[in-house]
């Protein structure tokens, strides 16, 4: 082989490697920004093939969510409409026919696409309990919350005044957590359903970026202080998805963590690196993308590309590694078929701390849809765990 040919091959290899590196870098920026930028709209991944209002039926395209048994929210027409869907009547490889339990708002007959979610209950007005709107003074300003008081007589025997603070996940709002009110109220708890920075209800941060729990915990600390100022003696924190990461930060970083009696985690992010690894593998992205995303989050220069005001401490958000720092009872509810946040880290935490972690495993149910899939199992697990706190 002549020098000229060999040199041309070498230049080609270097150019190809450089192009691959540039592509991985660009993908890293896209992935990193997608995770931390609050979405302006949600992907509608289900096609409405037919709606039969007289029969109370809807025919949907088949995907992992539309095939799930149970009862779900159905958002349609770019979230301008909402319906509640019930049991599956029939399905095949391409379609799913479900019962329509009700249309809350919007024109479902004119809709063409939508998405299923686990919310189901949109407002405390839909619950058979009294409630009131309150405001929590966070470091960024007042954040709206709902307060559902314990049933009359819950503390009449001199028992502690117990509160649960419910923290929703990424890219959703506090309505997500209303499903937890009933089992906690039955156990004598007051429920505080909170908002936090950048969720669309609470004040925005200057950078308008999720910090994956690394800064949102300060708003939960403010909610803890609100509860204590209003008579709470004992606190339970419940976090859903990214809310799980957030309450673990609040538990371990706030001085008020000493007032927390226990923690419930629903489909939680226990280790952000494990979750990012899962997402990169799920999308069949190059392994370099995983490394690039971690660098963008954890280095100050990464803020130029991501918009983060400060780097994130991802090691501090790995509670498998930090398992020995946890010292209160923890209930974890997670599905092995989550599809977004793998259950591996949740299971690893349960193995690392069997003395304090109660693990309730689900199958089939997807991310934050455990209540929808098996309400009795979900509520029963919480009720048994809460009863154990009294002993």
Image (cartoon, rainbow, N blue to C red):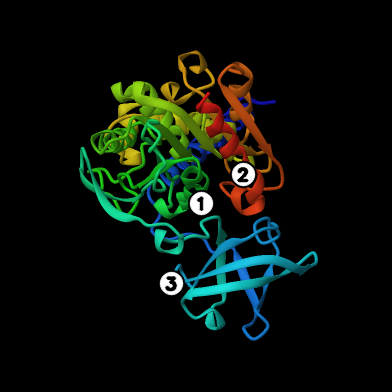
Estimate the x, y position of residue 244 in percent, counting from the top left.
47, 35
Name the one closer to the observer, 273 or 148: 148
**Camera-nearest label, 3 or 1:** 1
Marks 1 and 2 close (CB-CB < 8 Å)? yes
| Residue in view at x 46 percent, y 69 percent | 78
- Return the residue at label 2: 378
Name the one closer to the observer, 316 or 304: 316
Q: Secondary structure at mark 1?
A: helix
Estimate the x, y position of residue 159 in percent, counting from the top left.
40, 31
Q: Secondary structure at mark 3?
A: loop
- Horizontal side, residue 138 vs residue 387: left or right: left
| Residue in view at x 68 percent, y 43 percent | 337
Estimate the x, y position of residue 155 in percent, counting from the top left.
38, 37
- Horizontal side, residue 32 vs residue 376: left or right: left
Estimate the x, y position of residue 55 in percent, counting from the top left.
68, 83
| Residue in view at x 60 percent, y 27 percent | 358
Q: Residues within 10 Å of mark 3 (few under 14, many from 20)?
A: few
**Which comes sooner in the sequence, label 3 or label 2?**
3
Q: Residue furthest right?
A: 92
- Return the residue at label 3: 80
Q: Residue furthest front?
A: 157
| Residue in view at x 70 percent, y 58 percent | 69
């Amino acid at each position: 082989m002549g020098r000229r040919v060999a040199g041309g091959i070498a230049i080609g290899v270097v150019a190809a490697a450089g192009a691959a590196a540039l592509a991985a870098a660009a993908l890293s920026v896209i992935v990193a920004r997608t995770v931390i930028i609050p979405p302006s709209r949600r992907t509608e991944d289900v096609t409405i093939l037919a709606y039969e209002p007289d029969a109370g039926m809807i025919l949907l395209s088949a995907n992992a969510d539309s095939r799930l048994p149970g009862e779900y929210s159905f958002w349609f027409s770019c979230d301008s409409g909402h319906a509640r869907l019930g049991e599956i009547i029939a399905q095949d490889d391409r379609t799913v026919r479900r019962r329509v339990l009700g249309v809350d708002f919007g024109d479902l007959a004119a809709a063409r696409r939508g998405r299923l979610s686990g919310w189901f209950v949109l407002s405390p007005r839909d619950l058979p309990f009294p409630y009131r709107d309150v405001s929590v003074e966070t470091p960024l300003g007042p954040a709206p919350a709902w307060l559902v008081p314990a049933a009359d007589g819950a503390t009449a025997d001199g028992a502690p005044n117990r509160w649960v603070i419910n923290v929703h996940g990424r890219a959703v709002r506090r309505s997500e957590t209303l499903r937890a009110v009933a089992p906690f109220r039955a156990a004598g708890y007051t429920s505080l359903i909170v908002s936090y920075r950048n969720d669309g209800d609470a004040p925005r941060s200057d950078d308008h970026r999720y910090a994956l729990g690394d800064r949102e915990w300060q708003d939960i600390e403010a909610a803890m202080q609100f509860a204590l100022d209003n008579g709470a003696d004992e606190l339970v924190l419940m976090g859903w998805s990214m809310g799980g990461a957030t309450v673990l930060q609040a538990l371990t970083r706030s001085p008020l963590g000493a007032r927390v009696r226990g923690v419930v985690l629903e489909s939680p992010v226990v280790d952000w690196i494990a979750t990012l690894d899962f997402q990169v593998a799920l999308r069949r992205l190059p392994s370099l993308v995983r490394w690039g995303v971690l660098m963008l989050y954890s280095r100050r220069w990464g803020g130029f590309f991501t918009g983060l005001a400060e780097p994130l401490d991802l090691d501090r958000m790995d509670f498998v590694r930090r398992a020995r720092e946890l010292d209160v009872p923890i209930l974890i509810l997670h599905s092995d078929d989550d599809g977004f946040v793998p259950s591996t880290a949740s299971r690893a935490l349960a193995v690392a701390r069997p003395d304090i972690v109660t693990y309730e495993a689900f199958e089939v149910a997807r991310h934050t849809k455990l209540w929808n899939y098996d309400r009795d199992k979900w509520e029963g697990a919480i009720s048994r765990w809460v009863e154990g706190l009294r002993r």
